[in-house]
Amino acid sequence: MAPVPSGVLGAVDPTSDRAVFRQIADQLREAIDRGRFKEGSKLPSEAELVEHFGVSRMTVRNSIGVLQSEGLISAEHGKGVFVRPRPPVRRLASDRFARRHRDQGKSAFIVEADAAGSRPEVDSLEVKEEKPSRDISARLGSPRKVLARRRRYLLDGRPVEFAVSYLPLDLARGTRIAEPNPGPGGIYARLEEAGHRLDHFDEEVRARMPSPGEAKMLRLASGVPVIHLVRTAYDTEGRAVEVCDTVMAADAYVLAYQLPAT
Amino acid sequence: MAPVPSGVLGAVDPTSDRAVFRQIADQLREAIDRGRFKEGSKLPSEAELVEHFGVSRMTVRNSIGVLQSEGLISAEHGKGVFVRPRPPVRRLASDRFARRHRDQGKSAFIVEADAAGSRPEVDSLEVKEEKPSRDISARLGSPRKVLARRRRYLLDGRPVEFAVSYLPLDLARGTRIAEPNPGPGGIYARLEEAGHRLDHFDEEVRARMPSPGEAKMLRLASGVPVIHLVRTAYDTEGRAVEVCDTVMAADAYVLAYQLPAT
DNA sequence: CAGTGGTCTAGACCACTGC
DNA sequence: CAGTGGTCTAGACCACTGT
């Protein structure tokens, strides 16, 4: 068994008020922050840390758990514990739904990812009619049924976002919006062609830890929150024509907005 | 020792592929979701769960740890484990910096909290000159020194937000901006009085788990992420006149934005 | 196969809370 | 004081990874 690299980790003080596993977590955190363990690199194994600090294995595992829930490291069964690499971040600008971005044959996600040098994918496509939840119903003006469009977005094979669009059925039924591929410019282009000229979007942004289902769907490491974004699109008559409910891996996104100083 | 309320929790299957502690976590999560354990109420104690499921204490603690990191429950030493109450949420609207909100004697935070029936406080006030970090410097057009205004916001005694404003020193020195209380309308009103008419704000929104320091400052339970917001204010000449770096308890906020459909 | 992390046990002592 | 969660030990067996 390889020893812990010398000079990187010190000793713990069992008589300290600070719990031993916290002291170990502190030392590992500081070593990571100082770059002693680089992004993506492997930490000493549990057995090595047990040996180095002279504590039991559960104590070491406890300290690893602390850093995992801080999002700093992630454990891989049979391989080791690694410093979490920071993935490339997708920047969502506040003009991302501007009409001028809607004239391509491909979706904004594909175009943008290509430009950034990433490999984009969209899967889990599902389009169906549903009875809306109370919340969605309220946002859309209480339609009896809605069309739901579900899809998952991936970058370089990694799922980063899961989105569901809801539209009142009378706007969507029988149009390309009800088909898996709504055509160039996406559903917003189809809505405008049908005479629903878009006026503005409202977005609500929250952050929280993922549910187990979301963690699975986005393959999230522990310690990675999600951004929950709910966007409502309004036409020029003030009618809500679409609600998009999106859950994003928080480490893959930064949202950018511009606010008026009016 | 009181038994676990009958019918709420079942048994575990030790031969299942699913780890026992995950099965216990699943059962507790479902009971919470179904309202069997209400918001703020106490879960069965570890000893009771050990008795009920016939497993060792570490297994029970492990399952509790799962729900803690999901943000569903929080443990209080000597008291018990409780279903996390959802705190009142502060809604930040995209027009919150509009000039019409700037004519009161009190800060926007105080006015808004009063209106919502909460008891607002601001503490940890610190105003001093500093050498800016590389990031802040770049956003402000590379000033040699900046004025930093630090403060923490609390609602009903709970810290919800920690914010630092940075301004180029030449704009701030010798004005009320450099005083702890910048006067009615806040620093934006002072900037405009000095001829720096504000044009717009850029905001960048990220979410992540808190650092240990942030968790302490905001008294965050485990399983609560933070929203990290960086706002830059620009005057009508395109100059960045302020950067505000804010860390917010994610369970206390929802950010609302309006986007143009242009 | 050896090395890794994942799960689980059965105990021990401690610190905090509320009565 | 009894009851609670917090920390720690010293083992055991398992599942996954790479050679």
Image (spheres, coloured by chain):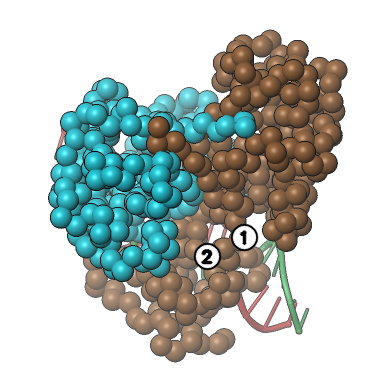
Chain colours: A cyan, B brown, C green, D red
How would you rate the neighbour count of disc 2 (Cα within 10 Å): few for under 14, some for 14-19, many for 20 or more? many
Tell me the kind of residue under disc 2. Ile
Mark 2 falls within which chain? B
Nearest the viewer among A167 and A191 is A191
Left or right of B178 on screen, residue B218: left
Report helix, strand or loop for mark 2.
Answer: strand
Tag 2 or tag 1, which sits nearer the N-term?
A: 2
Asked if B242 appears above or below A18 in the picture, the reply is: above
Nearest the viewer among A241 and A90 is A241
Nearest the viewer among B14 and B136 is B136
Residue B59 place in picture, x, y as percent: 42, 67
The quarter of the picture where residue B243 lies is top right
Picture residue at 20% right of the left edge, 49% below the top: A177
Mark 1 falls within which chain? B
Residue B9 place in picture, x, y as percent: 41, 81
Left or right of B15 on screen, residue B196: right
Picture residue at 65% right of the left edge, 36% below the top: B98
In this rendering, the label closer to the viewer, 1 or 2: 1
The quarter of the picture where residue A87 lies is top left
Rendered-image quadrant of the C terminus of chain A? top right
In 3D space, how far apart are the residues under numbered discs 1 and 2 (Cα atoms)? 17 Å
Report helix, strand or loop for mark 1.
Answer: loop
Q: Which residue is mark 1?
A: B88
Picture residue at 41% right of the left edge, 41% below the top: A199
- Residue B73 is tagged as 2
Mark yes or no: residue A249 visible.
Answer: no
Asked if A198 appears above or below B47 in the picture, the reply is: above
How would you rate the neighbour count of disc 1 (Cα within 10 Å): few for under 14, some for 14-19, many for 20 or more? few
